[in-house]
Amino acid sequence: MQPVATTFFFYFLSAVTVISGIAVITRRNPVHSALALIVALLGQAGLYLMLYAPFVAGVQIILYAGGIMVLFLFVIMLVNIERAQKEEQFNKQWIVGIVAALALGVLFVLVYMKGKGLFPQTVAQLPEGENTQGIAMLLYRDYMFAFEIASLLLLVAIIGAVVMAKKRI
Amino acid sequence: MLDYITSYLKSDTTPGQAGNFFWAFVYILLIFLGLSVAVIAMNWLERKILAHMQVRLGPMRVGPHGLLQPIADALKLLIKEDIMPAEADPVVFWIAPLIVVITAFTVFIVVPFGPTHAVTDMNIGVLFMLGVSSLSVLGIVTAGWASNSHYPLIGALRSSAQMVSYEIAMGLAVISAVLMTSLNTDGTGTLSMIGIVQAQQAQQTWFIFKFFPLGLIAFFVFAVAMVAETNRAPFDLPEAESELTAGFHTEYSGFRWSLFFLAEYSAMIAVSSIAVTLWLGGWMRPFPHWLTGETWDLVFSLFPGVTFVLLALITFYSTIRMPKHPYFRVQTIGLAGFGAVLGLIGLLLFVPPVRDRIQDIYWFAVKVAGFMYLYIWYRGTFPRYRFDQLMKVGWKVLLPIGLGVLIVTGILGVVLS
């Protein structure tokens, strides 16, 4: 079907993502931050849907919002929050932070100024119903070697984590 | 305007794909209504069936045979005082039941009750259902944390560990079924719920019987994992009443608690419909390729009406058996009226145009109802797992079986085609 109210949904989802992203770094309570991060991730999933990438959106929901964030919350709940809130922040990296933020801001301004040349004028018409099949073809046929290497790397990381965490195996 | 409404009736797709908002809204309302009725019916049936399994009568006082008990309970829950613990986190305490209920109902937009009877059909159907239902654990975890109390927190931690572990076994079982959809001439599978049922139609077999016994084993892994995912007995550790009073919803009362209740039952229906779609042929009637021909079509299309007429007959039989004391007169009349309504619905389902359109929905609902009965049966028979046993079953039994089935399915698919 034809997309409806594209502009509205784009600004709506962007606003949700940005506002909840700001909430992540401003909330004092880590659980509230984690919940705001989930909303931000869901907003991102909506943006992927608008880009005709339903598979990426689905994976975003199932992996980040459903899997990783649950583990985040799990860890946060085990930490003693009252003590963590009272402790002094010993992270003195605000100079680096400001430099990084300025660099990113300059990049955004440049993209905004020269945006017309950088991005194509027309939107690529992608087949909506073939996203999953297309990704499967790329991952398991065209770039299979790189994909398998990446999965091997993840497997090594998992085994490393288990070895480090468990004293007696 | 009228054109917009009637134009959809000529197309043979779901309203979501046709882009028709009016019919999509109607479908959503119908599904919401149907689910609510199903949850009310499940509430009554669960008590009755469990009671009869334990040689009790179950609810008998409110209405004939306790038929009005769910309504009385709902009223009680709505007028009950809504208590929030003084030290609770008010915002999160308020959001948690909403997360659970919204995720439990959102998944139903891709459930195919028939080839065109779904709100919409997505390219990522199964993935969407698994993803959104995996969000419900967030609601449980936040509910347990926001209550700021010991039992709910322990329940929440248990449930997050349990649901994350069983999601993996569940996903592997689903993948092996999705792999079976790709066994056609052009070798591309599908994740769309309607596409999966159509693949079973094209391969002329339910996936539970495909590569016997591989499909059956994958189905078994899913059937165990789905009970754990919905936190039902024997995997109901997050709300183990003998250890944690009520687990993650100990501090919830009144309306908020009823939201948790509603979400639990609709999540059960949701995972059962995934199982029905992936392995039991979705909306297809039994033996669509073996018992063919007009006679068999007619016989199977009479099933919905016959079911309701049978229910009506059972109700009338119970009406006759009601005590003759004047005290029971209102209840007897009410039961007779209920039977009459059931009978009228049954007669309506015999009308040819209705009969043809209602068939797929009927077969889908019957299969899901079978799973609902299994859920009650499990609760009546199995003792609760210990937490280390639960983890062992999830990681050391179901996960290797799921992986093995997936690999063997892949090999057989390559070898046989």
Image (cartoon, rainbow, N blue to C red):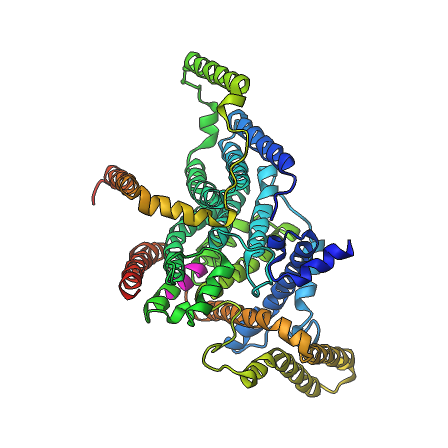
Q: Could you tell me which quadrant the C terminus of chain B lies in?
A: bottom left
User: Measuring 69% from the left and 71% from the top, which residue is drawn there?
Assistant: B62
Q: Is residue B190 left or right of residue A22?
A: left
Q: Is residue A13 magenta?
A: no
Q: Is residue A106 left or right of residue B32?
A: left
Q: Is residue B225 magenta?
A: yes
Q: Main secondary structure of the magenta part?
A: helix
The answer to which of B237 and B354 lies nearer the viewer is B354
Pinpoint residue B21: horizontal percent, then vertical percent.
68, 51
Image quadrant where residue B43 sits: bottom right
Pinpoint residue B89: horizontal percent, then vertical percent.
58, 37
Up-down relation of residue B305 to residue B283 (above or below): below
**Can I make out residue A132 in this image?**
yes
Image quadrant where residue A146 sits: top left
Toward the left, the furthest residue is: A169
**Can I make out residue B384 in this image?**
no
Up-down relation of residue B2 to residue A26 (above or below): below
The number of numbered discs placed on residues in the rendered structure image is 0
User: Measuring 61% from the left and 69% from the top, which residue is drawn there?
Assistant: B44
Pinpoint residue A112: horizontal percent, then vertical percent.
54, 19
Up-down relation of residue B165 to residue A164 (above or below): below
The answer to which of A14 and A139 lies nearer the viewer is A139
Up-down relation of residue B43 to residue A7 (above or below): below
Pinpoint residue B20: horizontal percent, then vertical percent.
67, 53
Read off the magenta span: B220-227
